[in-house]
Amino acid sequence: MNQIKNLGWRVTFAGLGINLALGILYTWSIFKESISASIKAGDGLFNWSPAALNDPYAVGCLVFAFTMIFAGRLQDRISPRITAVIGAILTSAGLILISFSTLWISWIMGFGILTGMGLGFGYASATPPAIKWFPPAKTGMIAGIVVAGFGLASVYIAPLGVFLINGFGLSRAMLIFGLAFLIIVSVLARFLVNPPRGYVHPATPKPTTKSVAGIIDHTPGEMMKTNAFYKLWVIFCIASGAGLMIISGVAGMAKQGMGDAAWLVVALMDVGNASGRVAAGMLSDHIGRANTLFIILIFQAFVIFSLLFITPGQIILLVVAATLIGFNYGTNLSLFPSATKDFFGLKNFGVNYGLVFSAWGVGGFIFPRVSQMILAQTQSPKIAYILASVLLLGSAILALMTKAPSAEAEKNSFMGVALPGEN
């Protein structure tokens, strides 16, 4: 028993370490500021349109999310180790590519597509094997610990990125990151193992008639015929998109009042990001996923709306708001995998969560691009903040209407359309 318990924690911390290496996505605002400075200086290195500054990041979010579908199936059927190594190779290849070019299309291909795919494979390999070693009562906590690494990564990547960019330039910094992540993730991948077939944790409650009827293992096709899937998808799209919109531009906001120390805001926001993942996972284990989502979405709407009244010179308020936004955004990354497992079972969890996670990519593609276009046109992000706040309030209401599909309800539904009597 102790050996099994230790193995479960070993897998959990290996997944945490992999996400710590691959969380470079959340440091985009640091890289974007370097590109923006080059454009404004007219030094000829980055001949991009200001409206296109978020394009590599937006494409990366989209590719990352949809890669999760295929990567999730691969780790379900073959091995999380192989999936993680593929992620390491792709992420490294993308970062090395952009270290040799400043062309917009090269950054779309390198950071957006190759690195985006690598992040998808790496992220998909980390959480599923970890939660399979633990009982249902710890699903939220374990998922939160593993994904916290992705959110916490900027705490060291942001200052390290600033140091490398100032000392060696942006291109050389990307090369160093690419080589380092290849080595780190490949080593940690060795510790990712699934439990033996048929394994059930001793603390798992024995199934009752009600639980057997109420929670079943769904195939991807069966999941996509339920209303719960589409409700989760819409909520995830809005919640993640609103958070990623702020994350993509927070360094620019902070730099106006803090100069080169703006990386500190990025780092603190990601401390909040990581904390939110663990805290929400543990809270939702006790009060439920939907109730936790409702509370978080309302709070996120309030905090983003408060940005309308915070100026770049109000550094303390900006730091507090950024940390809270990071916290709220981070909660999504533990709540939605936990809800996917609760609603649709563990057997096909990897690919099922990949499908749910596609919402993260769509939100991450749309919200930052729209906010950047609004900023380019109006010189102010306020319209984007108002729009995000309203959508978050709507998604909070939808969260209260989202319940796990029951076997009985699915018998009364046709292609996911609820019939009278469906829960």
Image (tube, rainbow, N blue to C red):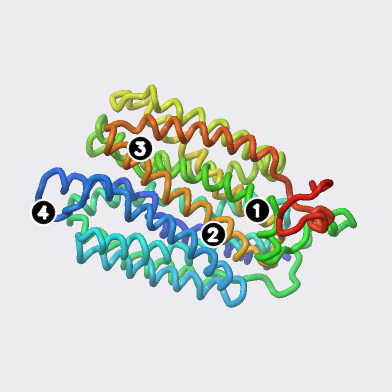
Q: Secondary structure at mark 3?
A: helix
- Kindly identify the residue that appears in the image at 50 percent across and 39 percent down: 327
Q: How far apart, in angstroms, are the residues tagged by discs 3 and 2? A: 26 Å
Q: Label 1 amino acid?
A: Phe
Q: Is residue 326 above or below residue 49?
A: above
Rate crowding at label 4 as few (under 14), some (14 to 19) or many (20 or more) other CA atoms within 10 Å.
Answer: few
Q: How far apart, in angstroms, are the residues tagged by discs 2 and 1? A: 29 Å
Q: Which residue is mark 2?
A: 13
Query: Which disc number belongs to residue 44?
Result: 4
Q: Label 2 amino acid?
A: Phe
Question: Where does the image place residue 202, in percent across and percent down from the top left?
Answer: 78, 62
- Kindly identify the residue that appears in the image at 18 percent across and 45 percent down: 37
Q: Which residue is mark 1?
A: 229
Q: Which residue is mark 3?
A: 265
Question: Where does the image place residue 374, in percent across and percent down from the top left?
Answer: 33, 37
Q: Is residue 205 left or right of residue 377?
A: right
